[in-house]
């Protein structure tokens, strides 16, 4: 091949048309209130686990809603991160949209960690 | 309702234009500008001035952040002074980048009149010239659009596939600087750009509406001009090709030199890098300028329109429309002397 001195960059945009939505649909079915999330980050701000570890609940459910399941189980956000949640439920208390955030964590664990 | 659509219209002067040529089009699509002048003068009987003293608008350097605003402003003022000197008031820049620069300058001068006075002073200090602001700035594609129904009866061919009798399916791509910077500057605004779609529909073709229709062609100035960044440029173009591929376009029509160049030439580069072409047979999708298309349909000789300079060859498209051409004359100069033929690419069929 001719060496042009550059390669075609891999786009970082997420192609939702070709993404696998099955797990996401299962999550929404199990926790219907997730539809109302506005991404405010209140859950992350109040999370005690998040204060002391890398765990970030908003990041976790955002990655899930963007069908980036492999990133939830990757080196940067390891599968054990989901296990860092103590299931204390503080996040559910602050969520302005009434999302069952603790339920989200439980279901994501079920779906991803099996 | 009528008032609502007023915001999507644009005033285009009727006659007496001052033409400003593009820096790069003469090299990549050498027949287009000459075709435009011929169409205006001979087909439409318009008066258009092609002044030999014109020069760059600095657009490419300006958008690459190597030419400062004040310099661009003074260069634009000098071009306007040429127009003023020739006695014209309707400015027609061939290139969409220039069109964006001029529209930006007029908006700047209106918002900050002291900048216009500065431009007058700079121009006077630099070359003792004076200028008037044009009454109307229109891109040549606007003018062809305006007269599309006047040109139609003169056309020998239609955008119809003569083998199937169906309209040709066309992807239209409008340069970002045409209406994305100043939305009022374009026909149909930035929301419903209609300048090329209007030509295609008027001349018998069918416009393809595909997901990445309004995505950038990938030029992006610095993304291309710095070699290390070219991966971004080509990735953008590839995104468009992938999006349009399933609609099987017969050709792509553009109104901007950069878009024309990148949509055409990147097809070769992608074919070399990934052995991928975006048509079924491996020839690529031909890319035409609106002047080349108008000229072809009017019956102008394809080789005098410069179609042999394109990367993706247009013979198969001309066969579909039924336009005759002489393969023996493809690589001849205007005296009929044969010129050397270009090398054939390894993967993209020609
Ligand atoms: S607090 Fe509720 S609405 Fe805000 S990001 Fe968390 S789940 Fe979503
Ligand atoms: S339930 Fe989990 S995510 Fe929510 S605040 Fe407690 S530790 Fe954090």
Image (cartoon, rainbow, N blue to C red):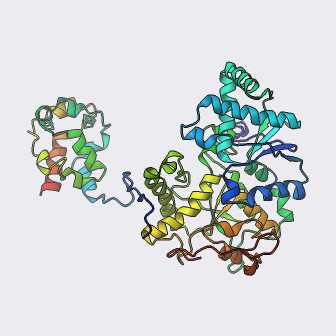
Q: Position of residue B331 (x, y in %)?
A: 71, 74
Q: Quarter-wise, where is residue A15 in the image?
A: bottom left
Q: Above or below — where is B259 with respect to B159?
A: above
Q: Quadrant of the C terminus of chain A?
A: bottom left
Q: Position of residue B37 (x, y in %)?
A: 82, 54
Q: Quadrant of the N terminus of chain A?
A: bottom left
Badge count: 0
- Residue A105 visible in image: yes
Residue B298 relative to residue B311: left or right: right
Q: Quarter-wise, where is residue B298 in the image?
A: bottom right
Residue at image coords 15%, 35%: A50
Residue B317 relative to residue B247: left or right: right
Q: Quarter-wise, where is residue B160 in the image?
A: bottom right
Q: Nearer the viewer, residue A46 or A29?
A: A46
Q: Nearer the viewer, residue B89 or B123?
A: B123
Residue B206 relative to residue A48: left or right: right
In which of the image's four quarters is ligand 1 placed? top left
Residue B127 relative to residue B267: left or right: right
Q: Above or below — where is B163 with respect to B15?
A: below
Q: Position of residue B305 (x, y in %)?
A: 75, 65
Q: Above or below — where is A46 with respect to A61?
A: above
């Amino acid at each position: 091949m001719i060496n042009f001195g550059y390669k075609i960059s891999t786009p970082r945009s997420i192609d939702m048309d070709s993404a696998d939505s099955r797990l996401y649909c299962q999550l929404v079915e199990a926790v219907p209130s997730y539809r109302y999330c506005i991404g405010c980050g209140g859950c992350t701000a109040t999370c005690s686990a998040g204060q002391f570890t890398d765990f970030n609940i908003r990041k976790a459910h955002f990655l899930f809603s963007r069908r980036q399941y492999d990133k939830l189980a990757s080196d940067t956000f390891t599968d054990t991160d989901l296990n860092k949640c103590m299931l204390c439920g503080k996040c559910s208390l602050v969520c302005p949209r009434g999302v069952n955030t603790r339920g989200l964590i439980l279901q994501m664990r079920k779906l991803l960690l099996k | 309702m009528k008032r609502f659509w007023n915001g999507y219209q644009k005033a285009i002067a009727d006659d007496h234009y001052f033409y400003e040529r593009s820096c790069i089009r003469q090299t990549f699509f050498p027949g287009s500008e000459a075709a435009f002048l011929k169409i205006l003068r001979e087909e439409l009987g318009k008066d258009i001035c092609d002044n030999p003293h014109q020069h760059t608008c600095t657009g490419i350097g300006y958008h690459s952040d190597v030419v400062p605003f004040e310099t661009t402003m003074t260069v634009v003022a000098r071009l306007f002074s040429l127009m003023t000197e020739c006695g014209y008031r309707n400015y027609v820049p061939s290139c969409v980048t220039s069109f964006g620069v001029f529209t930006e300058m007029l908006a700047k001068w209106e918002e900050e009149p002291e900048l216009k006075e500065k431009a007058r002073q700079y121009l006077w200090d630099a070359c003792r010239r004076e200028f008037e602001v044009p009454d109307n700035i229109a891109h040549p594609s606007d003018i062809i659009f305006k007269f599309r129904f006047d040109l139609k009866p003169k056309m020998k061919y239609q955008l119809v596939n003569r083998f199937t009798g169906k309209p040709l399916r066309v992807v239209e791509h409008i340069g970002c600087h045409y209406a994305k910077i100043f939305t009022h500057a374009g026909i149909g605004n930035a929301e419903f750009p209609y300048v090329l779609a209007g030509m295609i529909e008027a001349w018998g073709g069918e416009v393809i509406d595909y997901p990445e229709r309004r995505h950038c062609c990938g030029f992006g100035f610095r993304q291309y001009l710095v070699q290390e960044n070219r991966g971004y440029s080509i990735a953008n173009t590839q995104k468009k090709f992938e999006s349009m591929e399933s609609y099987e376009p017969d050709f792509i029509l553009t109104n901007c030199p950069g878009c024309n160049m990148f949509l055409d030439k990147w097809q070769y580069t992608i074919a070399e890098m990934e052995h991928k072409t975006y048509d079924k047979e491996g020839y690529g999708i031909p890319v035409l300028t609106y002047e080349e298309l108008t000229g072809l349909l009017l019956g102008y000789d394809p080789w005098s329109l410069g179609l042999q300079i394109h990367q993706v060859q247009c013979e198969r498209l001309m066969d579909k429309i039924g336009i005759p051409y002489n393969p023996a004359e493809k690589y001849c100069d205007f005296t009929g002397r044969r010129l050397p033929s270009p090398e054939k690419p390894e993967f993209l069929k020609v």
